[in-house]
Image: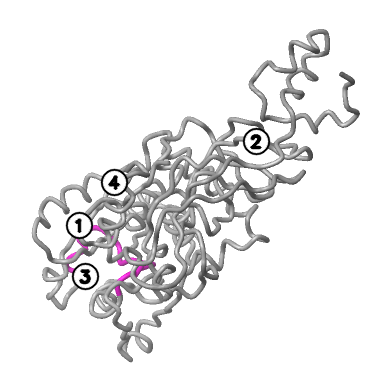
Amino acid sequence: MAIPRNFRAWRHCAPPGTLSRNFSNTSRNFSNTIRAFAAAASPPSKAVVYEQHGSPDQVVRVVDLPPVEIKENDVCVRMMASPINPSDINRMEGVYPVRPQVPAVAGYEGVGEVHSLGSAVSNLEVGDWVIPSPPSFGTWQTYIVKEENAWHKISKGIPMEYAATITVNPLTALCMLENFVELTSGDAIVQNGATSIVGQCIIQLAKIKGVSSINIIRDRPGSEEVQEKTKKLGADLLYTESQLSAKNFKSLLGDIPEPLLGFNCIGGDSASLVLKFLRLGGTMVTYGGMAKKPVTVSTSSFIFKDIALRGFWLQKLMTSDRTMVCRPKIDYLLRLVQDGKLKYEMELVPFSDFNIALDKAMGKLGSQPKQVIRF
């Protein structure tokens, strides 16, 4: 058997050692590179698909998909885990501003292991862990084929549930802390929705920067337990909405300065509470609207406090031309996870229990941790 001139065509589908026995006298570099015949196609895949928009528990089903051709610049990834985010549910419902054309495979972020490579792939190897970067539609399936530049290699030392969820919520928290106001040690921020994954990340990332956090949570049964968990993450001050009926918000701050930056993911009256904490010239960033009520700002806040209102949408930031800017931020967040400085509550669920996880993510079974599907 002659050695092909383009030895990169012999890549990653035969069992390890198949070719090394035939070319035992070649150089170490050569034997490490030539490991198998090129993969013509991916394995068949199981996927969560929806053919029309509607309530996710009514429109999704698990189907078998045929193999996909692997071209020279393609990477076939065996998906390991992918979360069920609120935006995933909104896309299936058809109410999210950007969504794939149906029929579609659901899911937007996740982590996988490189299964096989096209002949021209140069920066990845079989067994590498990768995440889609920028995140992309169709992560709720067992095998995905995309071009090499669509994948970002990460360390294998990361717990897979964190690797699967790092790109949407933690990156949102980091970008909002960095992109609007220049915060320095000793400053303060205020936020509602403090128990959300983004909220939990904001608390911890602010603490790392030496920035104090004032946190607002909803009144609900078991709020004492929630407050205790949130304080363990590093929250400096924590109030329920009903505790903020006092008009003199400055008296609630103690030694903490008035916040320069605020985050709103709820809207309505909860957003107004964030605004009341802000100092002169402060900025409130809105990144969600859980209450489905508008943000109402008093005229005096604009005139006498010079408050600025901004919005944040991660998908706008995660365009292909900004990918290389975001990847170092993702690596930073993953290092914090490895060092135990960034954590949030999740539940890793086997793919066979997908329907149960979907019910939990949709709120049918009460308050639940973020659901992460393990394939």
User: Which mark is first along the chain, 2 or 3?
Assistant: 2
Label 1 to label 3: alpha-carbon separation:
32 Å
The residue under the point 15% across, 78% down is 247
Element under disc 2: strand
Q: Which residue is mark 3?
A: 250
Amino acid beneath label 3:
Lys
Residue 2 percent location from the top left of the image: 89, 20
Q: Quadrant of residue 84?
A: bottom left
Amino acid beneath label 2:
Ser
User: Which mark is first along the chain, 4 or 1?
Assistant: 4
Residue 68 percent location from the top left of the image: 64, 48
Residue 216 percent location from the top left of the image: 22, 64
User: As drawn, is 194 to the left or to the right of 140?
Assistant: left
Label 4 to label 3: alpha-carbon separation:
32 Å
Amino acid beneath label 1:
Ser
Q: Which residue is mark 2?
A: 116
Label 2 to label 4: alpha-carbon separation:
33 Å
User: Which mark is first along the chain, 2 or 1?
Assistant: 2
Q: Residues within 10 Å of mark 4 (few under 14, many from 20)?
A: few
Query: Between tags 1 and 2, which lies in front?
Result: 2
Query: Between tags 1 and 3, which lies in front?
Result: 1
The colour scheme applied to this rendered structure is one colour
Q: Residues within 10 Å of mark 1 (few under 14, many from 20)?
A: few
Q: Which residue is mark 4?
A: 345
Residue 117 percent location from the top left of the image: 69, 37
- The reply to whether the magenta stretch includes residue 251 is yes
The residue under the point 26% across, 80% down is 268
User: As drawn, is 322 to the left or to the right of 247?
Assistant: right
Amino acid beneath label 4:
Glu
Label 1 to label 4: alpha-carbon separation:
12 Å
Q: Which residue is mark 1?
A: 367
The residue under the point 55% across, 70% down is 101
